[in-house]
Amino acid sequence: MTKNTDKLVTLERIHERAKVMKAMAHPSRLMIIDELGHGERCVCDLQELVGHDMSTVSKHLKVLKDSGIVKDERRGKQIFYTLRVPCILKFFHCIESVIDAHN
């Protein structure tokens, strides 16, 4: 019998998945991701949305960027953020289904 290695998930890949999920595991970061689903935003817009100081919002954005969820582009003195892979929002829909099924 031969193994189908295409379907095996490596431990390294599991850790990568956990890193992405851990990056999302904060209400402010979930808010940022959801907002970026509507298009690019500058840091100042995200700061207003989240309601934290610039330093805190920047730390949240760094976590999201380091995990590969968002990307940034500097334009003059402003930095604009977008979702690197917008399909992350499909995961949000899946989570909503879990919540609805649980209630």
Image: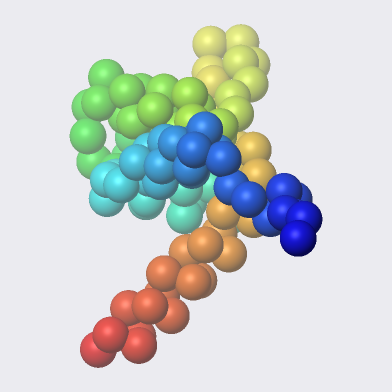
Given residues 93 and 53, the one toward you in this image is 93
- Residue at the top extreme? 76
Task: Say above or below: 69 vs 96.
Answer: above
| Residue 62 makes an appearance in the image | yes
Residue 32 seen in the current view: no
State the residue at coordinates (32%, 23%).
Answer: 59
x and y, in percent, of residue 37 in the image? 57, 53
Q: Is 69 left or right of 49, judged from the image as shown?
A: right
Q: Residue at x 44, y 36 (%)?
A: 15
Question: What x and y, as percent, mark residue 64?
Answer: 45, 33
Looking at the image, residue 99 lies above or below residue 55: below
Q: In the image, 50: left or right of 86?
A: left
User: Where residue 3 appears, x then y in whole percent?
Assistant: 72, 54
The residue drawn where x is 48% and y is 24% is 66
Quick one: quadrant of the N terminus? bottom right
Q: Nearer the viewer, residue 74 or 17?
A: 17
**How many numbered marks are there?**
0
Which of 63/1 is in front?
1
